[in-house]
Image (cartoon, rainbow, N blue to C red):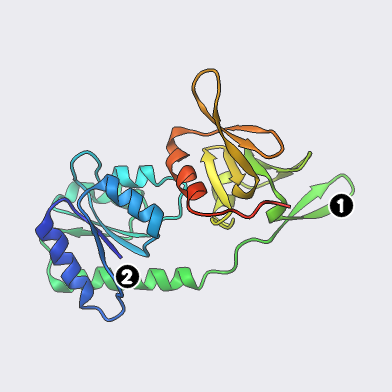
Amino acid sequence: MLVVDDEGLARSSLTILLKRDPDIQSVEECAGGAAAVEVILRTHPDLVFLDVQMPECGGFEVLERLAGAPLPVIVFVTAYDEYALQAFDAGALDYLLKPFDDSRFKRALQRAKEQLRSRNEAPPRLQRLAVKGSSGVYYLRVEDIDWIEAADYYVCLHVQDKSHLLRRSIADLIGDLDPQWFCRIHRSLIVNLRCVAGIETDGAGEYEVVLQRGQRLRLSRRFRKDFTARMNAGPVRPAG
């Protein structure tokens, strides 16, 4: 669990309430949004209580910086009620308005625990994709896909020197792929981390992901931090 708030008293109060619950094993604290992003990418907490307004990097910016990464369950905590709609639009499970009593906190924590249980009961990640060919249907092993690009209402699956169209949106497909191996690097691109050779810059100074087969894919600023953090997290088994 992670508590993020620039006010020390607010962090301590939430930590004390969390530690009263026998299901909570450990609680970390962050005093700012930038530090929270690093901790979330490094430790992958199940649940984050996140303040909305913080100097330099507020709660909504934290979620922007985590775009493309698997998100923990988020409960926003704030003294301002005008951010509630924006919080739910950003994918927050709940919105705690300061000051809140123990009963309201317990309801928020119970909802979060129920959400985590439902996540843990989710079906296994996608192993094969059925694609139509000129003479029938073919089944592709997901781990053999080098990279994926959006193509209107379809995605184009690149497997070695071949490509296959699949009628699904890229936003829908990324949710079924194993986040250990597949990472979004652009709003229209997903890459298999096992196929990555490195990162380079082009003539305009823009970053590109270079694959082992030589393809160069645009790495957008929005997804760069998540991509580099996951590539640096540990050894990646090569594709093949």
Q: Residue furthest right?
A: 135
Name the residue rendered at 31%, 65% in the picture. Answer: 1
Cα–Cα gap, marks 2 and 1:
46 Å
Which of the 4 image quarters holds residue 18?
bottom left
Q: Tell me residue 40's x, y (percent).
A: 36, 55
Name the residue rendered at 39%, 55% in the picture. Answer: 42
Does residue 106 sit above or below 52 in this rendering? below
Q: Residues within 10 Å of mark 1 (few under 14, many from 20)?
A: few
State the residue in front, 3 or 229: 229
Tag 1 residue: 136
What mark, if any, has residue 111 been given in the picture?
2
Q: Does dot 2 land on a helix, a strand or a loop?
A: helix
Q: Residue furthest bottom?
A: 22
Q: Tell me residue 173's x, y (percent).
A: 59, 51
The disc, 2 or 1, on the residue closer to the chain's N-terminal end is 2
Name the residue rendered at 67%, 33% in the picture. Answer: 215
The kind of residue tagged 2 is: Arg
